Image: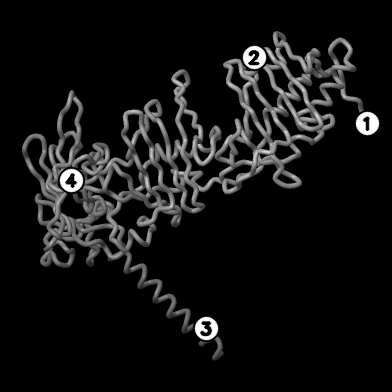
Amino acid sequence: MKSLKKLLIPLAILLVLIILTVVWFLIKPSIGSGEVNEFDKNVVVYKADEVKKITVTKADGTSVSAEVEDIDSERVWNLVNSDTKEGVNYSSTKIETWVIMLSQVVANSLIDENPSDLALYGLDNPEYVIDITLRDGSTRKVLLGNNTYDNVNVYFMSDSSTAVYTTVAMKSQFADYSPIDFIDSKIYTMDYSNLSKIKFERFCDDYIFEADCVYDSSTAEPSFYFTSPFSIKASPYFKNLVDYVATFEVAKFIDLTDDEITAYGLDNPSFHFTFIMNDGETYEIYLSKNIGGFFYGYTNVSEDYFTVSDMQIKYLETPILELLDSYICYQTVSDISSIKYTSDDLSFEFKIDTKDSISSEEATVSLNSRNAKIYSSDNRCYAAVLYEALSCIEINGIELDANPELNSSVNICFYRKDYDTQNIDFVVRDNDTYYVFINGTYTGFYVNMKEFIVDGGTDTYNYGIIPAYNLLTAAIENNINNVYDIPEN
């Protein structure tokens, strides 16, 4: 029996608590919730095209003011602050968004129709005073005070009544804007047709790259050719890197103290780009390392520091070899008249005449004066196998500090139809690799010897130069009606 009583007492207490809770919610609106059944929520609501000017004055005495100007039937918003900076592009779109946010203040709660103490809401000395001038000359005023305890809403009142309301706290965030928040997020618009050179300093590995820009007006696309510390065409990865850096949009402009400049590495940036235009203009970008998904930076065209998301800029630390064309001296076959190969063990001359591909019907090809247009049963051209082996020698590594002597073990000479000659020498580096010289100058690159000796067997897309020569020779000697198939082992 005593056990039953022990159970009944907590149950009774629980029942009383449930009843009190229900009563609380039933009477809550009438004992100080600050809400009434009906009130006009549209306290201050104007469309942007009704507004002529808007000024926000902060509690510290600073202010931001914007005014609209009609230009060729378009409304253009401009900042009219005395502390705006000359030469800085302020975004009319950002300003208009700010105007829309602050000229439409909709109440989500009526707190007190006749407050006795505005200090309870921070409205005795408002955080922000918004003065709105309409196009008809009339004016309105909105006061923003403290945030509510949960920081979801902010207390406000207008000049049309004594009532205190709440609205979304985002209004305060917009009211706190300063001129720096209106700077156009796109700092610079790159005109590739006017771009001459790029210099990219990457201090994380102490490389300084310089590249020329060659603009193709027919495709409106640029190509890049490194001139330092090596001479070679840049890869699509470098083109993508340039695109990112030349077209990124700022996440946010920021004011930094001297200590913050040091903390973010901007006194010693990790990356520095210089774009040199044909008209002599230069555009420079300095970036920190990646810090929490953002790069901090500045440019020579703006005094303001900024952050940019690592989704906006990529490939800054791409391995060097990926920034270069894969091949030591790739040549388009239609530009070539002949190729001579010379080593201690093998010499040959490979003549080509085509306006298209080496496999095309109109092409004529010879190896040591013998017809080399031999095909497999599935139409693979063996002359193409040899040409690919000669022109697609992949770079294996970079060794800029080396100073090898030109004691050539292998020489490949490409004779072009424009009478230019690419003379490539391969000098033994170690048991597996060759240093590469082009036209008598060390390139800074080395290649693997397998580029000369790998035998792909039936895989005709994986042949080194010597096996490719042997394969074409076998096809020339053993073809039937210009068709030859590799014997199965």
Q: Indicate the amino acid at tag 3.
A: Leu
User: Which residue is disc 2 drawn over?
Assistant: 356
Residue at image position (70%, 15%) is: 352
Q: Indicate the amino acid at tag 4.
A: Thr
In the displayed image of the protein, which residue is found farthest to the bottom? 2
Around disc 1, counting alpha carbons within 10 Å, would you say few (fewer than 14), some (14 to 19), or many (20 or more)?
few
User: Which residue is disc 4 drawn over?
Assistant: 84
N-terminal label among 3 and 2: 3
Around disc 4, counting alpha carbons within 10 Å, would you say few (fewer than 14), some (14 to 19), or many (20 or more)?
some
The one of 352 and 61 positioned closer to us in this rendering: 352
User: Which residue is disc 1 drawn over?
Assistant: 489
Q: Position of residue 188 (x, y in %)?
A: 33, 37
Split into 4 quadrants, where in the image is the N terminus?
bottom right
Q: Position of residue 37 (x, y in %)?
A: 23, 54
Q: Disc 3 to disc 4, how far (Cα)?
A: 74 Å
CB under 8 Å between callouts 4 and 1? no
User: Which residue is disc 3 drawn over?
Assistant: 7
Residue at image position (80%, 28%) is: 346
* Above or below, comparing residue 156 to residue 77 in the picture: below
N-terminal label among 4 and 2: 4
Q: Disc 3 to disc 2, how far (Cα)?
A: 96 Å
Q: 418 left or right of 271? A: right
Query: Tag 4's secondary structure?
Result: loop
